[in-house]
Amino acid sequence: MTYPENFRYTKEHEWVRVEGDTGTIGLTFHAQKELGDIVFVDLPKVGAKAEQGKPIGAVESVKAASDIYSPVSGEVIAVNETLATAPEKLNADPHGEAWLVKIRMSAPAETASLLSAADYEAYAGAE
Amino acid sequence: MITKVRSHLSQNEPLLFEISSPGKQGYQLPELDVPEVDPAAALGAAYVRSEIEGFPEVSEVDAIRHFTRLSTWNYAIDLGLYPLGSCTMKYNPRINEQVARTEGLAWIHPYQAESLAQGAMEILASLERALLEITGMEAITLQPAAGAHGELTGMMLVRAMLEARGNPRRTVIVPDSAHGTNPATVRMAGYEIANIASNDQGMIDIAALERMVTEDTAALMLTNPNTVGIFEVHIREIAAILHARGAQLYMDGANMNALAGIARPGDFGVDVMHLNLHKTFSTPHGGGGPGSGPVAVKQHLEAFLPKPRLAKDGSQWRWNYNRPQSIGRVRAFYGNFGVLVRALAYIQAHGGPGLKAATMDALLNANYLRKLLEPHYQIAYPAPSMHECVFSDSRQAARGVSTGAIAKRLIDYGFHPYTVNFPLIVHGALMIEPTETEGKRELDAFAEALIAIAQEVEQQPALVLEAPHSTRVSRVDETGAARNPVLKFTART
Amino acid sequence: MRYLPKSDLERRQMLETLGLARMEDLYAHLPNEALLDRPLNIPPGKSEYEIADYFRARGAENAMGFANFLGAGVYSHYRPVLVDTVVSRGEFLTSYTPYQAEISQGTLTSIFEFQTMLCQLTGMDVANASMYDGSSALPEAALMARRITGRHRLVVARNVHPEHREVLRTYTQYERIEVEEADYNAESGCVDVKQVESKTDDATAAVLIQSPNFFGVLENVGQLAEIAHAKGALLVFLFTEAVSLGLLEPPRDADIVAGELQSFAIPPSYGGPFAGILATKEKFMRQLPGRLVGQTKDANGNRAFCLTLSAREQHIRREKATSNICTNQALIALMATVFMTVYGKAGLRELAVQNLSKAHYLGAKLKQRFSGAYFNEFAAVTTDAQAANRKLEQRKIIGGLPLKRFYPELEDSVLLCCTETSRREQMDEVARVMAE
């Protein structure tokens, strides 16, 4: 799997794609593979506050559950509603169609602390 | 050739709601010997419901066939080895069922006068004495309804005692090999969890523990033998490290079947522990309950035990509610009395020497299986096993077959699988606890089956991956169940 | 020993396989100081005959064969014979939690039926596979309400079962939850609606009520739900007398229903084992603690059942689970399932009407403490409850519960319960003795 160069990654296996002051958040290919068949995605409401490194939701498979940690701080401005009825999209297209939330970032400089695609790939591969 | 099973007719049976038909009945009440009261007049029409929509209407014959057919779709201890690790699935003696149904025991109301419940209280006292002797502890409550309920009670006792000493402290240390109930319990008792990693022998790392325990540590929650079936041989040092800093040693008694009559937690430094009567003391698991989770403590925790406590005035038992430091009740009434009766009957049947003999047979069976299986499966840790043995699926995983698939294939050989994927510290764990109530013949057949499966993994892995092949339902789609939850029957219109 | 299926010869063969000489070698690696250096001080094993004899003798010391007018959370209902016939089958009795769905369809199917019938009875969308009992289901409902609302205060009616309220306090004491009580109306026996209203505020997670309440009196669920909902709090509804659900309007306006199923063919057994349940609206489904069974298909497309939504539970979520609860009360829940099946739609109502009729027969002969409508138990005024109970004891009748045990202000009152098993001549006797 190749990890998009234009994303930044966390060690908890989330990605963020920055466009202006908006960060689109998702789960990495590695994360969905480790979890297996995803059955439920618990996402915050629009307007919720996110803080870097703090849980903003959770994702569940049959045999596992994992919190989703926000890679950036800010306010949730959009939520991917399709995942409520079609969680399997997270297994099918984790870096694209199955994004989780969009956040209006309050501290864009935070992304500097995140991993590059190459660093993340090395980290996920070693885990 | 599979020696234990061959195919057999199994009857189809719709749901109750599908066999239901208006006007059928399976009951008859006696004729009312008082005037019938009109519900709407007595209660007000707004309080009275219309019919219970969808509720079944079947005859007595329909009912017994329904449940009997359903029963034949279950595997059970009565059909053979049920080696779920950590669950202690042993034979459930039927005399225990009979005595629990004794009229004078099954029909005692919890609020009848103490003078009219002396027999029940004597049974409870007698069980308390036996359990204290087996554990080496100093006081015990029989109130908790299950193991996890006992854990919660035990952790609350620790908290109440530390609070009384001035500082409840903040964290409880839990090994990474612990049952999921342990961390969940710790949080419910208001503590934070500090995980401690096991060492390469599957035991607590003494040096790491020494570094972790501080004045902020309330307790260590330890299962011994631990969840990989290994006795923590440094248990006395572990207790000393905790006690030196004012912390408590909590023992999860899930694996007490390895110790009864051989070693006592009270003698090796444990301050508080729970027992699982449905494991060690053979009360039936009943498809998931009821259980019972008594909590035994040392004297310094006695004042905090749930109320009421048994007390004796002369020759009369009474309940003592005057317990100002008690954590309070953890449930209504006095505990799962019917389960406690069965546990006492079990202890009486074995007696002291029998309990020890049973423990030794449990160790013998686990080690015997380990010996037969070790050439074919990777043992998780080289340390000696107690009452269960844990393997990793690493050799089979290299062929693309995981512990979960091996478990499903075992069903085709006529056995209930072992515990799958637990403890989490072992990759692809196969956790096998045969208990003492298995004979050599059943153990040999089980080992034969697992060895045959190991060969299938080498030669025709697809056979294993698609198992089970011989059950009335094939592999059940758990993912679909979770993605689209259907939790009750709805009639099609 | 009869539970150990090995001969000494087999033991020797197995030890030989292990390269060991004696059974004691199996634990020779344990540190000496951890070993018990003496035999257990428990008498040697007994025969079946001796065991049966011991328990029969103890049973005879507990007012065996007495008629019983106690309710207060534990009810003496007739247990249809089919109940023990079914739960005594080894396939139900000696199996465990149905983790392996392919060989547990019997248990799974019966739990699915149980969940369905509990939904039909309570008017809720989802019911779990059972809890330990009603008294622990109540705090689990409260903790669930806190998770849903993010609030930390509870308002509990003082006429909720006193021991259940004690358990609520125990469970919440380390969870930073405040529990406040709303008193009952001294005239009606219902919860004081004004107090509920004044004590419920923006920090209230739930209002907790019981109906029929501890005094046997029915509560106005709709009105109490409105009060709770107006402040954004949930209404938790507790029942301890499940037979009442056969006749009473289900608590559709509640958000969470916690209940005790003892009345459904579970023997009183000095207070346990019983089975509790939690049921709720679909939108709160993922906050339910405990096991849930769901319908699905097998690989061939046949209907099948399995445990589901497990990611809520401790074995996956560990410290973030909805509760530490592990087991359900499957075998006890099965008793309730068989009971509901045997009585069915018409029977459960007829049974409830018999209970109502008997209680009102006795109730009409006694002075009522409260004016509220009651189902099968009620508080009666008496001059000396203890003395009356002693006299009844002479006649092999266990009288009612003196209420001052839990409510000091109700010194002159006794809680009496009648079920379908109460006989007219016994009720007449109770009325006569209590009037003396």
Image (cartoon, rainbow, N blue to C red):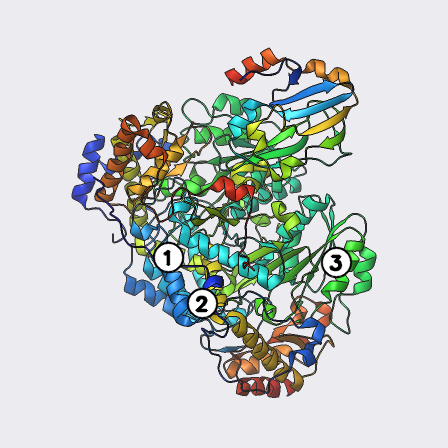
Chain ID for label 2? B
Left or right? Give the position of C134 relative to C307. right
Left or right? Give the position of A5 relative to B382. right
| The C terminus of chain B sits in image quarter | bottom right
For the residues labelled 2 and 3, say whether their Cβ atoms are less than 8 Å apart: no
**Does residue B371 appear anywhere in the picture?**
yes
User: Is the same chain shared between marks 2 and 3?
Assistant: no
- Vertical relation: C92 (above or below) B59: above
Q: Which percent across, then down, holds residue C405?
A: 65, 68
**Quadrant in the rendering for residue B244:** top right
Question: How much space separates mark 1 and mark 3, taking CA atoms?
Answer: 52 Å
Chain ID for label 3? C
The tag on residue C181 is: 3
Q: Which percent across, then down, holds residue A74?
A: 77, 26
The tag on residue B106 is: 2
Mark 2 lies on a secondary structure that is helix
**Counting other residues with Cα less than 10 Å from the Cα at mark 3, is it few (<14), some (14-19), or many (20 or more)?**
some
Mark 1 lies on a secondary structure that is loop
The residue indicated by pointer 1 is B12
| The N terminus of chain B sits in image quarter | top left
Disc 3 marks a residue whose amino acid type is: Glu
- Foreground residue among A118 and B380: A118
Question: How much space separates mark 2 and mark 1, taking CA atoms?
Answer: 35 Å
User: How many marks can you see?
Assistant: 3
- Foreground residue among C16 and C317: C317
